[in-house]
Image (cartoon, coloured by chain):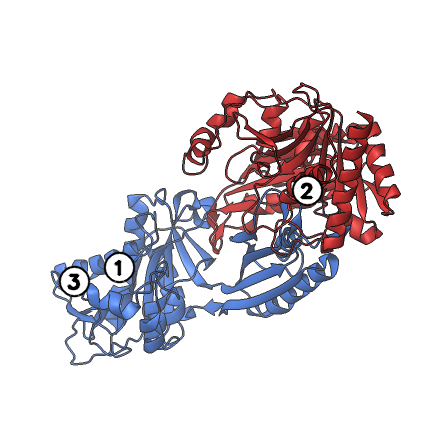
Chain colours: A red, B blue
């Protein structure tokens, strides 16, 4: 950022802003572009970093062409989008957008008990810029799709209309641990049999007229977990996604009903705690159309889609007009070393971003 | 054993024999009684130890009464019945009965790499008595039931007709790990959904006309096991029990069919490896009837039942006429600190054992 002549500001949660100062003396950006540079364990190359690097490259290209914006253009790398070490994810953008308090975020601890505050201080990124003081009229995030939809459709640019709603639950099923050889089947309250029923019931939420778009049990831990012991307890996660607000609104009742049916059928006690509840986000239609037109003008094939994953843009959409640009992910792979987007598609995505920011500067 | 005047012999796998020498010069015992004194982690008081202590008490009672057996009476504590630290379980009786080679048993390693041979040497129990050199005409094991059957029936003494067959499998289900938000349901090969189908299919083996007596998935591990990642791999155990040889013989084909149905329905790859295959054991009818008569003569209520758990007696039954006596387990609890049998019932069990050994001495 400094090499490109940007003024760097690090805010109190470690969000890194690079400001290309406009001709007018005004802190309020015309457009903020960016994503995040943290990643997951055993990750790929593109998730997050691509959107920050491309935004910086857009500024470099415009500066090289002798452009002087009237209002400031910003590039941002948000803190801890992935939430791998510290919960919650999308931490930096959530604090910036006022959806999470700075105090709560700084107090979050990793598995070893270290706080975000001390981890930021240690790496020199507990900045002094006040949260929310870098304001903008719009936010635009370029990102890899992390799914197979664009590739399957043969589209080069994804015009993201919004982010589907996400609900997470932690479910605990309590039966009775017992000897697998000596306990008659009729005397058992097997927590894993109940969990298996629930795994299949949850998958059924994605089938039929009122289907939600995705349901996943990603984590399931059995106790005591020995070959010859009837499982006494299972702890499992639910991850439910749906873009349509009216269907998203039915999820809690449908999870309750699925659990009640399992309790009735098995006699196992079940408790569920909702840990994440992010209703569907719709991006700004005007900015989204601008992305679509820019892609078309550059000769890229486009496709409208809803993001399956959460993004910083989802938080930014709460406070300013926001849009997202996707490029395809080969085989839909992400969060793994096989994550890949061909260079031409990466350049296409950056050029769409460049065209939109240039239009904003020209018309701003 | 030494306090009771028994000659102690420790064999090459650490089995401890206490020999009450008979009047005749003969190493071949009239009757060997015993069980094991190893136990599980966080165990109860009675499993195993009760049968060894009671056998020793029988010898003490007979000696105190001035009995002199013609032929030797033996008490045994077999090595490593539980298999907690070293596999396989029932190690000492398996080696004694020739079902497991001494070399293989001594080479078995614990999680830290220590062998049975070195662990036995360290505690001074790598004995010199040759495997199988302590021979006997019959074996009798007294043990707690470890299940709820006797208690539920209100019976004081269980006359054990045999041990149900046990088959264990390690099953691996390989799907494809992927992003839980961005991967359409139709593109998924979710290893946990397939595993849930298999858990329920396995339970179905215990229902209907050809039902087997018990089926348990006790261990199930999900990879990568993160909330927002579609499970790519599941490793799970199967524990299947059945006392009737003809039904036990159908288990392999029925497991294969259940797996094939899951593969067809889900597209997940499944491999299964059978790790334990112990066909049902029937105990000696004559010795079993002797136990039943002894209990009746003592005024105990009896019940015939099949053992759900494996026991050293199951191995001994391969080489000599064998029987088992059970006493009730309160609430069917075992392998936990709540394991409990009231003192009167423990004494009843020991008296049944005493009466049988006394009859053998008298008639021998």
For the residues labelled 2 and 3, the Cα–Cα distance comes to 85 Å
> In the image, residue A58 lies at what x, y percent?
71, 39
Judged left or right of residue A3, residue B326 is left
Query: Which residue, given by chain and number where applicable, does mark 1 sit on?
Result: B52
Q: SS for tag 1?
A: helix
Residue drawn at x 16%, y 73% is B21
Task: Identify the image quadrant of the N terminus of chain A.
Answer: top right
Q: Is residue A95 above or below residue B199?
A: above
Residue at 67%, 18% (x, y): give it: A25
Mark 3: secondary structure: loop
Do labels 2 and 1 touch, CB within 8 Å?
no
Q: Is residue A363 visible?
A: yes
Q: Mark 3 packing: few (<14 Cα in 10 Å), some, or many (20+)?
A: some
Residue A133 rendering spot, x and y as whole percentages: 60, 20
* Cβ atoms at labels 1 and 3 below 8 Å apart: no
Given the image, what chain letter belongs to the residue carrying mark 3? Answer: B
Marks 1 & 3 on one chain: yes
Of residues B273 and B77, which is closer to you in this image? B273
Is residue B59 or residue A232 the one in the foreground? Answer: A232
Examine the rendered structure and indicate whether residue A12 appears above or below residue B109: above
Q: Which residue is mark 3?
A: B1
Q: Are marks 2 and 3 in contact (CB under 8 Å)?
A: no
**In this view of the protein, which residue sits in the foreground, A270 or B207?**
A270
Q: Residue shown at 69%/64% (left/top)?
A: B260
Disc 2 versus disc 3: nearer the observer: 2
- Work out whether A352 lies above or below A68: below
Which labelled disc corresponds to residue A57? Answer: 2
């Amino acid at each position: 950022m400094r090499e490109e002549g940007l003024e760097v500001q690090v805010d109190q949660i470690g969000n890194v802003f690079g400001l290309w100062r406009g001709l007018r003396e005004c802190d309020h950006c015309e457009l903020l572009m960016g994503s995040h540079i943290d990643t997951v364990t055993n990750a790929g190359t593109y998730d997050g970093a691509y959107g920050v690097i491309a935004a910086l490259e857009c500024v470099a290209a415009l500066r090289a062409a002798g452009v002087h914006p009237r209002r400031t253009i910003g590039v941002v790398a948000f803190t801890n989008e992935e939430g791998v070490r510290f919960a919650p994810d999308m931490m930096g953008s959530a604090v910036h957008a006022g959806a999470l308090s700075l105090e709560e975020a700084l107090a979050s601890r990793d598995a070893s008990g270290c706080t975000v505050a001390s981890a930021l201080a240690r790496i020199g990124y507990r900045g002094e810029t006040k949260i929310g003081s870098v304001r903008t009229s719009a936010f635009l995030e370029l990102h890899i799709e992390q799914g197979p939809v664009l590739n399957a459709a043969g589209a080069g640019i994804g015009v993201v209309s919004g982010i589907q709603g996400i609900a997470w639950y932690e479910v605990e099923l309590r039966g009775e641990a017992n000897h697998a050889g000596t306990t008659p089947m009729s005397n058992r309250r097997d927590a894993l049999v109940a969990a298996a029923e629930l795994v299949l019931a949850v998958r059924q939420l994605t089938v039929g007229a009122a289907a939600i778009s995705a349901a996943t049990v990603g984590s399931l831990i059995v106790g005591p977990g020995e070959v010859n012991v009837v499982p006494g307890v299972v702890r499992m996660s639910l991850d439910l996604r749906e873009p349509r607000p009216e269907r998203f609104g039915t999820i809690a009742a449908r999870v309750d009903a699925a659990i009640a049916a399992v309790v009735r059928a098995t006699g196992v006690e079940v408790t569920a705690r909702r840990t994440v509840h992010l209703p569907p986000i719709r991006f700004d239609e005007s900015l989204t159309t601008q992305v679509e037109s820019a892609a078309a003008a550059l000769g890229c094939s486009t496709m409208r889609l809803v993001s399956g994953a959460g993004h910083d843009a989802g938080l930014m959409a709460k406070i300013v007009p926001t849009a997202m640009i996707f490029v395809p992910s080969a085989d839909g792979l992400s969060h793994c070393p096989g994550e890949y987007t061909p260079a031409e598609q990466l350049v296409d995505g950056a050029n769409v971003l460049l065209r939109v920011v240039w239009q904003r500067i020209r018309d701003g």
